[in-house]
Image (spheres, grey):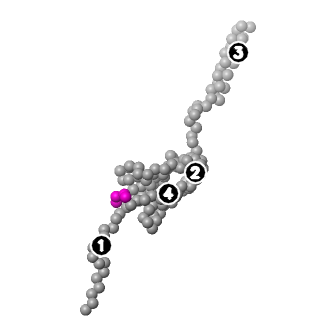
Amino acid sequence: MKTLINPLVIAFTLTIATFAASFANANPGKNPAPVATYQTSMYTTTEGKLQIAVEKEATGVVDIQFVNAQGKVLFAQRMTKREKIARLRLTLHDLPDGTYQVRVTNNVEVTTHSVTLSTQPPVSGPGRLVAIR
């Protein structure tokens, strides 16, 4: 009888350990956050400001950044999970001429838009000469 009980206890213990391991979460606390899909649009206003519009789902976060050519972030804003629409107007008058980027990311994909600032030199003298003889 004793020889029959020992193998049964061992088999029962192994069965419980197997079931416990199969139900255990292999990655506790690291469930992936939902990713928000988004749409962007940009245009310049008549005052020379940059208008940025972002619409997204209310499931994840979206980061908006304005970056110079060296990679320095000049402006950053995060849209939280509950925000669906962001309308931004950036004043670019104080920035030097050059190439900049607007980056919009949901931490999975990145949308990059290039912005070039250039100042036209003033025209010296009249633009048109009218001569009468």
Q: Which amino acid does label 1 sit on?
A: Val
User: Quick one: label 3 or label 1, which is nearer the N terminus?
Assistant: 3
Look at the image and give the residue range highlighted in magenta.
94-99
Location of residue 53 in the rendering, given as x and y in whole percent from the top left corner: 52, 58
Q: Can residue 10 be seen in this view?
A: yes
Tell me if residue 12 comes above or below residue 99 in the rendering.
above
In the drawing, does residue 120 fall left or right of residue 105?
left
Location of residue 7 in the rendering, given as x and y in whole percent from the top left corner: 68, 13
Give me the residue at 45% from left, 64% from top. 44
Residue located beneath label 4 in the image:
88
Q: How far apart in space, not on screen, are marks 4 and 1 (Cα)?
A: 33 Å
Return the residue found at the far right. Answer: 1
Label 3 Cα crowd, 10 Å radius (few <14 / some 14-19 / many 20+) = few
Contact (CB < 8 A) between labels 3 and 2?
no
Q: How far apart in space, not on screen, are marks 3 and 4 (Cα)?
A: 70 Å
Residue located beneath label 2 in the image:
83
Indicate whether residue 98 is drawn in magenta.
yes
Location of residue 74 in the rendering, given as x and y in whole percent from the top left corner: 41, 51
Return the residue found at the far left. Answer: 133
Contact (CB < 8 A) between labels 2 and 4?
no
Query: Which element type, helix, strand or loop, lies under badge 2?
Result: loop
Label placed on residue 109: none
Query: Which element type, helix, strand or loop, lies under badge 3?
Result: helix
